[in-house]
Image (cartoon, rainbow, N blue to C red):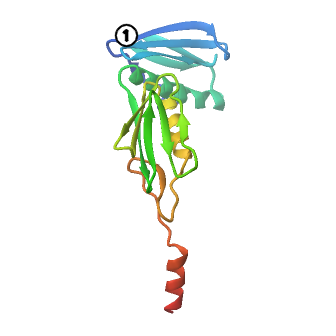
Amino acid sequence: MSRIGIKPILIPNGVEIKIEEDAGKYNGQKIIFKGPLGELTQELRKDIKVKIEDNKVILKRDNESKFVKSLHGLYRTLINNIIEGVQKLYEKELEIVGIGYRAELSGSNLSLHLGATHPYDLEAPKGITFEVIDKVNIKVKGIDKQLVGQVAAEIRSFAKPEPYKGKGIRYKGEYVRRKAGKAAKVSSAGTE
């Protein structure tokens, strides 16, 4: 048995769950979650079934194949993240390091000035909001954990932190291992 998949998920107050049968591209169930912050859906494969009993969500699998076993814990985690997301916002924090590097909000869009000839403009996807603090700290907020992480990774990909000067965009608290530059190597080689 999947250690994660067999754990029931408690449905908190204010969250409504509706299950539709034989829906979507997987011919399985479609689950609609409504909460105080919004609505999200999750489609399941036909081998995984969801039931609601005693104000808890329980996942069962139809067979014991390796593929279905791997999906059991995955879908339980996805459903748990959605239930948490419709109650509270997920957020990722990014920080910009480098002289002249900055971020600005123009409406709901994010504009990044990263030393290129033109700014990088990123339109906020549906359900995502940006917050810029001090022109170098960015918060990505939303109810969909997967989408928040994807947008934060996309922002980071515009200027990944480089190991020599540490310039670029990094996650808040991320450690960037620094390398000694060419000048440091030459000067240390001459002392031997």
Residue 92 placement: quadrant: top left
Residue 139's x, y, as percent?
Answer: 40, 37
Q: Decide: is 102 above or below 76.
A: below
Task: State the residue in front, 68 or 93.
Answer: 93
State how many labels appear. 1
Q: Toward the viewer: 10 or 128?
A: 128
Left/right placement of residue 16 relative to residue 22 reads: left
Can residue 83 be seen here? The reply is yes
108 vs 41: above or below: below
Q: Please tell me which residue lies in front, 39 or 50.
A: 39
Tell me residue 94's x, y (percent): 42, 44
- The answer to whether one can see residue 1 in this image is no
Label 1, secondary structure: give it.
loop
Q: Is residue 101 above or below residue 183?
A: above
160 vs 140, left or right, is: right
* Mark 1 surroundings: few (<14), some (14-19) or many (≥20) residues within 10 A: few
| Residue 155 locus on image (x, y percent) | 52, 41
- Quadrant in the picture for residue 107: top left
* Residue at image location 47% in from the left, 63% down from the top: 165
The residue that label 1 is drawn on is: 54
* Residue at left offset 68%, top offset 16%: 25
Check disc 1 and give the amino acid type: Asp
Q: Residue at x 63, y 9 (%)?
A: 23
24 left or right, relative to 179: right
Residue at position x 54%, y 36% from top?
121
